[in-house]
Image (spheres, coloured by chain):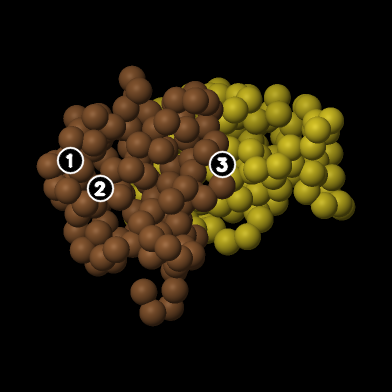
Chain colours: A brown, B yellow
């Protein structure tokens, strides 16, 4: 379970890292070389593509930060956790839940779902 | 989205089917030949194993029924939905959320998580 929490925390940290080189390094350490990400709005395969995809998402919401919401829940090679995205000093405006498959300690597949999206987002 | 709702409904129907042959048929129509299921308590691979696994779960909770809880949410080849399990005429005692990966209209991978488990379950 500690590994699941660590993965979720490092995942959120990667989504919050705005320095391109630093984010690419975090993503490469966290994801499998052929790891995949998909949610209703975007998708990426492999650390380079995923790091660039996160950078593009950050551009859409400048100054916003991701934070874990509630507990990280996992069993075996699977985990889920919920998150919020909003201004660094404010409440979360967008909320979602991500589901991950882990392989050899790295993220092999992440599927994101949106729990709450403001009507004007 | 209609396909996601249909898959979720057929999935719940398979979990509620207590006739072994009928359940095996429902599972075989719903899952890929190499489809996988895993949750914190059990796992199965392929329709025969999954149908038998569901039968064993039914033995633990005789007379209980599964029902969808809330909306089915999906995008592309991915869906999630929540369910409850309890007496046919009562409220849900156990609640969970399942994440599914679909391939060619069939369930390729289902990962279940428990949202609520009574302390005496």
Provide the chain ID for the residue under circle 2: A
Q: Earlier in the sequence, mark 1 or mark 3?
A: 1
The residue closer to the viewer here, B21 or B70, is B70
Q: Is residue B10 visible?
A: no
Left or right for B58, reference B80: right
Q: Residue at x 65, y 54 (%)?
A: B68
Say whether mark 2 and mark 1 are on the same chain.
yes
Look at the numbered disc 3 and give the secondary structure of its residue: strand
- Which of label 1 and label 3 is nearer to you? 1
| Spatial CA span between label 3 and label 2 | 22 Å
CB within 8 Å, label 1 to label 2: yes
- Residue at image position (32%, 27%) is A106
Please tell me which residue is depicted at 63% across the width and 25% down the height of the picture: B41
Instruction: Give the image location of residue A96, x and y in percent.
Output: 45, 56
Task: Determine if marks 1 and 3 fall on one subunit.
Answer: yes
Q: Where A88 sits versus B93, above or below? A: below
> Judging from the image, what secondary structure is the residue with disc 1 in?
helix
Q: Secondary structure at mark 2?
A: loop
Residues marked 3 and 2 touching at CB (< 8 Å)? no
Above or below for A77 versus A81: above
Give the quarter of the figure containing the C terminus of chain A: bottom left
What crowding class fits label 1: few (fewer than 14 Cα within 10 Å), some (14-19), or many (20 or more)?
few
Q: According to the image, label 1 marks what residue?
A: A22
Q: Nearer the viewer, residue B83 or A68?
A: A68
**Left or right, A8 with reference to B65:** left
* Residue position for label 2: A17
Disc 3 is attached to a residue of which chain? A
Separation of residues labelled 1 and 3 (CA atoms): 27 Å
Q: Where is residue B16? Give x, y as percent.
A: 70, 42
Residue assigned mark 3: A71
Residue A119's x, y, as percent? Answer: 43, 78
């Amino acid at each position: 379970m500690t590994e699941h929490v660590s993965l979720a925390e490092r995942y959120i940290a990667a989504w919050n890292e705005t320095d391109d080189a630093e984010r690419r390094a975090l993503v490469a350490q966290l994801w499998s070389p052929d790891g995949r990400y998909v949610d209703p709005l975007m998708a990426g395969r492999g650390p380079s593509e995923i790091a660039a995809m996160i950078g593009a998402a950050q551009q859409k919401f400048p100054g916003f930060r991701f934070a874990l919401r509630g507990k990280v829940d996992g069993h075996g090679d699977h985990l889920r956790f919920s998150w919020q995205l909003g201004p660094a000093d404010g409440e979360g405006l967008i909320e979602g839940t991500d589901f991950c498959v882990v392989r050899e300690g790295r993220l092999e597949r992440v599927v994101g779902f949106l729990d709450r999206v403001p009507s004007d987002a």
